[in-house]
Amino acid sequence: MSYGIEVLNASGRTVFNTDQNYPNYYSSAGPVTANGYEPNPSYTAGSSTILLGRPHSNASGAIFYDPLAGRFGASGAGVVDSMRATFGIANGVRYAKFDSQANITASSSGYGVEVFNSSGSVLYNSNTTYGFNILATGTLQGVMDVTYTPPAGVAFNNVFVSAMSFTGAFLYSAAVFPAPDFYTFFGSLAYFNHSTSTLTLRQVNIVQGVVCPSWNTASNSYAGTNARRDYMIVEVVS
């Protein structure tokens, strides 16, 4: 930059840059712990708020979100908890909502640092409690798996994914003779493996009869192979 102020954090990431007009994001409440297989975060899809999610601390499980149902781990009629457990859906979710700092009312007194962009909106406010560092971004296209390992120094319990990057639903159709039970998952998911501190990102279409599948069952239907889904993996910090 030719002039202005640029502030970096300890890992070399930009905290703010006065040449930019795009504000940071913040959360005043931080992560919320919700129990059960289908928690509702009361989130409005398409809003400027970013919804992040992961399993409970020290737990493994698949994270996906259904914007129509408004729930994590959304399942269809007839799905019971034993099926959810077999598939590997996270039993309980930690989620956080982040809003643009441009929505913060400028301070008239107090202490700290407040930076404005050229239009007068808040670019950065040092008095916010929670923020996030972007660890990775990418695109899932067609039937695709991606394995991600956070860098050294990042606590796995602080790793979240953007909920709208991983949308899907787990469905069940009871047997009607001569057809057997059928289980379907279509969409994308992020599986958090706490024991290995890795994430597996999947875009899949699983249709399986008789036996309930697991989250890592290979795609056996290729509908939607041209689908694209951008994803973001972050570290929530305070």
Image: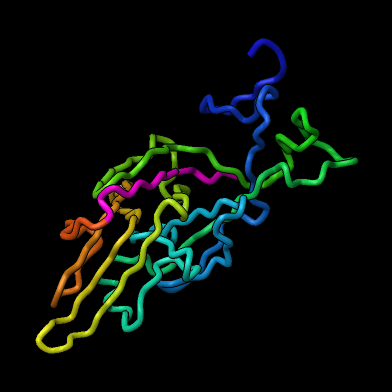
Q: Position of residue 176 (x, y in %)?
A: 17, 88
Residue toward you, 44 or 90: 44
Residue found at the very far bottom of the displayed protein: 177
Q: Which of the two residues, 155 or 189, is positioned nearer the viewer here?
A: 189
Specify the quadrant of the image occupied by residue 171: bottom left
The structure residue drawn at horizontal position 49% and vertical position 43%, both measured from the top left corner, is 235
Main secondary-structure element of the magenta-colored stretch: strand
Task: Residue 223 in the image: state x and y as whole percent.
Answer: 24, 57
Give the x, y percent position of residue 62. Answer: 34, 60
Q: Is residue 236 magenta?
A: yes
- How many numbered discs? 0
Q: Residue at x 43, y 68 (%)?
A: 92
In this rendering, the answer to whether 69 lies above or below 56 is below
Q: Is residue 160 left or right of residue 104?
A: left
The answer to whether one can see residue 68 in this image is yes
Q: Which residues are magenta?
A: 224-238
119 to the left or right of 208: right
Image point (23%, 73%), residue name: 183
On screen, residue 49 above or below 234: below
Assess whether residue 179 is covered by the magenta stretch.
no
Outermost residue to the right? 108
Quick check: 69 above or below 160? below
Position of 123 relative to 94 (above/below)? above
Instruction: Tell me the quarter of the picture where residue 209 sits.
Output: bottom left
Image quadrant assignment for residue 77: bottom left
Residue 212 lies, in percent from the top left, at: 19, 73
Q: Quadrant of the C terminus?
A: top right
Q: Quadrant of the N terminus?
A: top right
Residue drawn at point x = 44 percent, y = 47 percent: 159
